[in-house]
Image (spheres, rainbow, N blue to C red):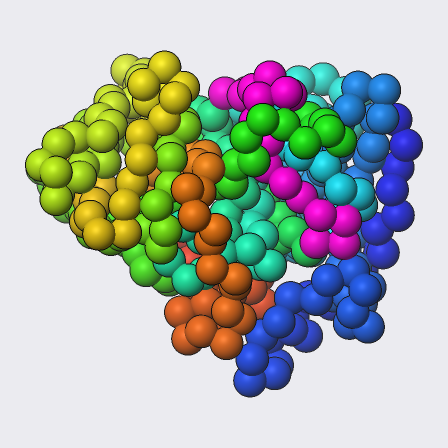
Amino acid sequence: MRALDVEPAGGICELLSPATVVVPASGDPLAPRAARSPYLRLFHDRGRHELVIDVGPVDLPPHSMAEHSEELVYQLMHVPFDAWVHGYRAELSDAQGARVPRRVLHHIDTTRPAARDLFLPVAQRFVALGAESEAQNLPAWLAGVRLRRGEPLLVSTMLHNPTATPYSGVRVRLVLQYTETRPLREVAGFRVDVMFPTGPMEFDLPPGRTVRSWDGSPAVPARILGLSGHLHRYAEWMELRDLTARRVIWRARPRTDASGEVTSMPVSLPHLGLGRVVYPTHRYRITASYFNPTGHTIPEGGMAKVGGIFTPVAPLPEVAVGDPLYQADIRHLLGLRCDPGGMGGMMAHAAHSE
């Protein structure tokens, strides 16, 4: 496995100073300075056709966020070669190479600033994994997400140790399995969230039942090939509904442990992988339900998003970096790292999730 060059030290917060935020591609003069980070490295295993995004190492004290947590939020990398990604998995290990429990991974998320989302004019989300997420791998000949050489990719990692055991030198490795041959279907990632359009995605959970939803329409006709969801403790169910056709596209209940923590979410392949078409002329609603049995409000205890892959029936519009919603979204993402209050909110959110 060969290490790929990534500049040491960080300068991504400089992007927030202009009136219009533009995340630079690898050929832009600002790109090398903005991509500097001591906590992100790339490895390429050509024999296995794997690109590894390696985040860390950081220490995880008991019942705490990872040390240097602010440095893990939205680091910038650039795709080193053209590829179609068809699979992914997350691996966690400590300084000795021993496995670390998956529950310390709150999330590792990736965002494509140069590509547009299906439902909103914001940066397209790519791979997002939480503690409950399972590895996925489609046949290389069948489908893959097209990544282009030099394309910027924002990588955000959040680690939180809810146990009494300290872990040192923890690394998260997001392993992307790829092919260099165009597959039968070129796909992309999408997501919908009950807290759209932008800003914080967490919400408070008062005692009893809380139901949240968001309505929207895709920019173009698209065929959804696979989808799953992300929920937090005390979640009951979530669904994606076609309001225009008056039918449920997808409904799922999380698998939970005795304490109500989500241990996994089912993955759905509509129509046995043939997919289900969504239309710009239809309205769609994501809904999630929680039941808080504690008798007190859990601040920022709820989250609910559906994500998956789709293939567009018509081409997606080009990303419009000047769009006010695009700018608000990028500023929010980078603000989680660069705004002094951003990490404070994330730390409070993690503490409430124990």
Q: Is residue 320 magenta?
A: no
Q: Is residue 139 magenta?
A: yes
Q: Is residue 220 visible?
A: yes
Extent of the magenta region = 134-151
The image shows residue 71 at horizontal and vertical percentages of 66, 55
**Left or right of 5 on screen, residue 63:** left
**Left or right of 7 on screen, residue 128:** left
Residue 1 sits in which quadrant? top right
The image shows residue 121 at horizontal and vertical percentages of 42, 62
**Left or right of 204 on screen, residue 26:** right
**Left or right of 91 on screen, residue 290:** left
Closer-to-camera residue (209/58)? 209
Q: Is residue 268 visible?
A: no
Q: Is residue 177 above or below residue 311?
A: above
Closer-to-camera residue (212/317)? 317
**Residue at 82% across / 72% down in the picture?**
29
